Amino acid sequence: MADIIQLLPDHVANQIAAGEVVQRPASVVKELLENAIDAKATSIKLVIKDAGKTLVQIIDNGKGMSVTDARLCFERHATSKIRKAEDLFNIHTKGFRGEALASIAAIAHVELKTKPEEDEIGTHICIEGSNVNSQEPVVVPTGTTISVKNLFYNIPARRNFLKSNPVETRHIIDEFHRVALAHPKIEFIMISNGASIFNLPSSNIRQRIVNIFGAKTNEKLVPVSEETDIVVVDGFINKPAFAKKSRGEQFFFVNNRYIKSPYLHHAILSAFEGLIKEGTQPGYFLFLEVDPQSIDINIHPTKTEIKFDDEHSIYAMLRATIKHSLGQFSIAPVLDFNKDSGLETPYDYNNKKPVPPTIEVDRNFNPFQKETSQGSYNSSFKRDKTSSWEAMYVGLENGASTEKFSKHDLKFESDEVTGKLFETNDNVSGRSTFQLQKKYIISPVKSGMMVIHQNLAHQRVLYEELLKNITVKEAVSQQLLFPLQIHLSHIDIAIIKGIQEQLEHTGFVFSSFKIDSLEISGIPVNITESQISNILVQLINDINDEIPEPGFSQNDLLAKSLAKSFAVKTGKSLNTEEQEHLIHQLFACKEPTISPTNKPVLITIDASDLDKKFM
Ligand code: ADP
Ligand code: MG
């Protein structure tokens, strides 16, 4: 038989290797950032266009490459970081496989400009699908700039497989966070489609966390620090009160490399046991230093998983250390003397003189007098002239949509309007519904009785309403007397900006966006000002959890999240009119029986079932 085995040509081998190393633009970002760090850069700039699909560019001021190295770096297994097998057990750099640049050059248009300190002239190389198209001298500053254009241009299947721009950008930002958190001393800048997304000056780790996640983060952090023979732990955990439903801010670094370790994650969770609500997740930023010889980083091509020699001891130690920090924190408040006080005070207050507190005494107050004017609403709603619950019904009369309301009408949103609203229930003869445990509305039906979950029912009503507004582009909003300023992290601001239009269709009016805050001057009619901050945070969490696709499902997610936030809660007393109105609206819905999150809204109990109970 003739010989049939052949060696694969290099460009084919490189393409195959690329499949492992480069899954998406974010993988390119990770590899190039790591190379810049290995090159000892002190300032690194990341520029992306179209979520990295059109361009990923990294500009560093590191040590650069000689002419020969510039050519060689694109060869497979070309690395300056290890020389012999033993070096594998003593890794101090991010990279060492010598595969990244070869892989990337096999599947994109790559341009490299680089110059080492000692040379006058640098090197400019253009390479496409592993073919070097040009190599010439160039005048550039010391350091390296790599531009990766049109990723997967020669593998259409991979290119089509990429997700929408918001999703791919999210992945890139995640990688950027991981690298930037692990290297607070290095300055990082990120620019996306010409807009500055992050500008992180060289700082300590606490400031880096705050610069990335927003000034509000500072108060959440509890320091963690411990040193044993096998491991040094440093970093921060979030106070238990700030635990979130979503995973969000969980960062675990080993020797300054971001690592996923379900096992050690569990150690952290178990330290928080009993301190956070079930189903919520603690935030953490933990840095472990171990002897490089005691770990194996090589078990995953993207190097996000490692193997520890002594995993059990690290588990126990991590758990104990965090428990200790949590314990200390709950006994004595943590003082941070390094804290930049500017982070604490809102800008508006910086130069204000303190105002002496005033005491108001209500001389007519009589503790034995019953509250009268507030009807069935509990006292926490006293502040609002119009209760939030009544406000929900403004404009929704007889299933009429809010579209008919102009801003002018809304100025009069008060007792008058709501009073009129409930008069329409005249036709209901007598009392036909009642509320059970401030949670269910019971209503008789022909075959027996119906039990309606008030919160889920209202979610359904609002969901359909919101979805219609978002897609039909009808805005109804109430003007705020004073614009409301909300502080969020850069990334959260970017998320809100991305859905600004849809939010405006639901009634939000944004008057300005800054890098870490936004200003709201109008809000949907069915919510109050004090709810806004929580609603936005919930929305951002929901978006982060689901990573929506553009188009239909994003609107759907938005409507679901807002419906959940706006809906009347369990624990709220509803009077008969309110109960009936809700039922009325519910049955005007397209799908009255299931909630937006697919839970049953109502059940019916047949009289025959009741009969059986009495036999
Ligand atoms: P690895 O990082 O595993 O060594 P890469 O393919 O990522 O493999 O890079 C190959 C080599 O190119 C590196 O070992 C390094 O010597 C050189 N190199 C890559 N990027 C840079 C950079 N930004 N500055 C200086 N040298 C670089
Ligand atoms: Mg590398």
Image: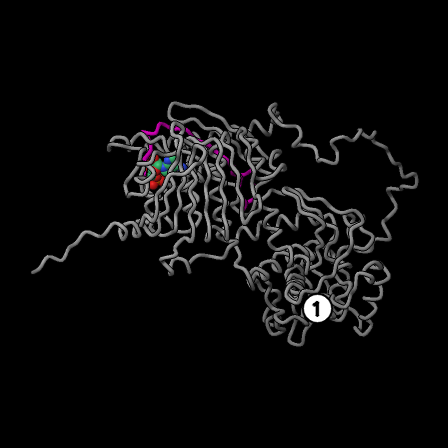
Name the residue nearer the viewer: 46 or 445. Answer: 46
Secondary structure of residue under mark 1:
helix
Say whether residue 496 is magenta. Answer: no
Residue drawn at the location 65% of the way across and 70% of the way down: 589
The amino acid type, in three-letter code, at marker 1 is Gln
Q: Is residue 476 left or right of residue 63?
A: right
**Where ligand 1 lies, by image quadrant?**
top left
Tell me if mark 1 has few (under 14), some (14-19) or many (20+) residues whose alpha carbon lies within 10 angstroms of its own: many
Q: Residue furthest left?
A: 1
Q: Does 171 sit above or below residue 338?
A: below
User: Magenta residues?
Assistant: 272-298
Q: Does 419 sit above or below residue 492?
A: below
Q: Residue furthest right?
A: 364
x then y, percent, for residue 604: 62, 70
Name the residue nearer the viewer: 338 or 537. Answer: 338
x then y, percent, for residue 511: 72, 50
x then y, percent, for residue 287: 46, 32
Q: So how many labels did they put on this image? A: 1
Location of the N terminus (image quadrant): bottom left
Residue drawn at the location 83% of the way across and 68% of the way down: 423
Residue drawn at the location 13% of the way across and 58% of the way down: 4
Name the residue nearer the viewer: 338 or 264. Answer: 338
Q: Which residue is mark 1?
A: 585
Looking at the image, can residue 133 be seen? Answer: yes
